[in-house]
Amino acid sequence: MATSDVQIIAKRVKGGSFLTEERDPQDVFTPEDLSEEHRQIAKTAIEFIQNEVMPVAAEIEAKNFTVTKGLLRKAGELGLMSVDIPEAYGGLEMDKVTSALIAESISRTNWFPRSPETVDLILSVTPASRSGWLASTNPAISIARA
């Protein structure tokens, strides 16, 4: 087929247009839209960082992997590392708002126990590969389960 026979209809996307275009207030997500579950998860993440991570920040920076591994295990037990991972593969499969809240809470430090690439890996490998490979090679899952 010649390219002249193909019509491509694309919507022109303008970066930042959300700032200048009209929006209905109910279409804008604000902190007031967070559920009680969202607030509790964010509080858990913040408390974990403040109470568990920050007191040992120097040890983390000194590459004390015993401390880091213990923190990863605790973060896994709290569910902070697997919100984006489907339940079928040991994750919590929660919404993107939850994931963003955890990331925001943890990003207050240089310590980020979740692997954002995990979701990409899950989606790019075959189902047969996922079961053993994912848990054995991804520290976010394997350390939390250990």
Image: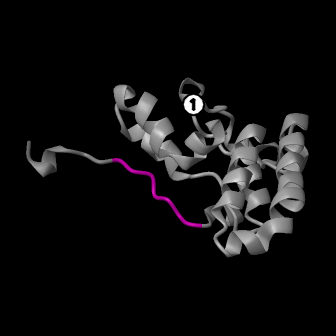
What residue sits 8% from the left and 47% below the top? 2
Tell me: 42 left or right of 16. right
Local secondary structure at mark 1: loop
The answer to which of 59 and 49 lies nearer the viewer is 59
Residue 88 visible in the shown view: yes
Question: Looking at the picture, which amino acid does disc 1 mark?
Answer: Pro
Q: Position of residue 131 (x, y in %)?
A: 44, 28
Q: Check the image and report above or below for 86 versus 28.
A: above
Report which residue position mark 1 lands on.
86
Total marks shown come to 1
What residue sits 75% from the left and 59% below the top? 106
Q: Position of residue 138 (x, y in %)?
A: 50, 46
Q: Identify the image quadrant of residue 51.
A: bottom right
Q: Position of residue 46 (x, y in %)?
A: 86, 55
Which quadrant: the C terminus? top right
Residue 41 belongs to the span the image colors magenta: no
The answer to which of 38 and 50 lies nearer the viewer is 50
Colouring method of the image:
one colour
The answer to which of 103 and 109 lies nearer the viewer is 109
Q: Main secondary structure of the magenta part?
A: loop
Which quadrant: the N terminus? top left
Crowding near pointer 1: few (<14 within 10 Å), some, many (20+)?
Answer: some
Tell me: 59 left or right of 89. right
Residue 23 visible in the shown view: no
| Magenta extent | 9-15
Q: Check the image and report above or below for 113 versus 1.
A: below
What residue sits 63% from the left and 51% below the top? 114
Q: Position of residue 56 (x, y in %)?
A: 81, 67
What residue sits 70% from the left and 45% below the top? 73
